[in-house]
Image (cartoon, rainbow, N blue to C red):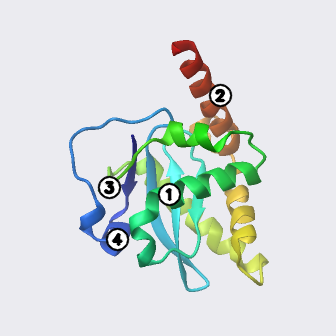
Amino acid sequence: MTNIYTTKKLEKIIQKKVIIDSNILDDNFLGSWNATIFYIAKKKCLLFINSKSFYSVIIPKFSMKDIDKIDTLFLANLYEQLQYEKIAIDLNTIAFMIGNINLRPTNNNRKSIGILNYNIEKLNYFKYDYPVFNNLVIREMTEKLNICPFKQLNWKVPKEAMITLLNNTITKYNAQN
């Protein structure tokens, strides 16, 4: 089970009906994620940050009719981002690692929320480099976020941290079976 903690801003938009407020905290192999909403070219986009690796994933052109399939959209966009960045992993493997997705109210993780805000500011800066916004441009902008080193990761980049996290998870899983 993967917990995605939403910011207050996102929580207001997706409404409380999809937020699961439970005290059960079963995180999966990859840890929890934090999510927020931002706009590119007047279109809603969702930004997700992994709490362990700060790896970013964006769901572009999000609309309210997609709210019921947010879990499949997240999984598809995570897989597409990994493929775009040439991180070799099978869709079934990543689906197994993610498991069920639960949207939860904010966990007030200051580090993750700070990274979300930092990435939104970087995206606002990047958007001036592109005259048109399509999925390929969004993937490229997200890759730029994932190759920015962070002191919290001992100056590693989120892409390297995610590769390490995926490899460790696969190794642990194979050792158990």
Which kind of residue does numbered mark 3 sit on? Thr
How far apart are labels 2 and 1 at the CA level?
Answer: 23 Å
- From the image, state whether disc 1 or disc 3 is nearer to you: 1
Compare marks 4 and 2 and give the one earlier in the sequence: 4
Q: How many marks overall?
A: 4
Kindly identify which residue carries mark 3: 106
Closer to the chain start, of discs 3 and 2, is 3
Query: x and y percent of residue 43 in the render?
Result: 55, 82
* Left or right of residue 159: residue 67: left
Residue 167: image tag: 2
Q: Secondary structure at mark 1?
A: helix
Kindly identify which numbered label has been placed on residue 72: 1
Compared with 43, 89 (above or below) is above
Q: Residue at x 59, y 56 (%)?
A: 76
The kind of residue on which mark 1 rests is: Thr
Kindly report the distance in space between the C-alpha atoms of the residues bearing marks 1 and 4.
16 Å
Residue 55 image label: none
**Between disc 1 and disc 3, whose residue precedes?**
1
**Residue corresponding to mark 4:** 14
Q: Residues within 10 Å of mark 2 (few under 14, many from 20)?
A: few
Q: CA distance from mark 4 to mark 2?
A: 33 Å
Q: Are marks 3 and 2 in contact (CB under 8 Å)?
A: no
Q: Position of residue 34 (x, y in %)?
A: 44, 53
* Mark nearer the N terminus (1 vs 4): 4
Query: Residue 20: percent from the left, percent from the top?
Result: 26, 54
Kind of residue indicated by mark 4 = Ile
Label 1, label 3: how many angstroms apart (C-alpha)?
21 Å
Which residue is found at the position 39% from the left and 36% from the top? 27
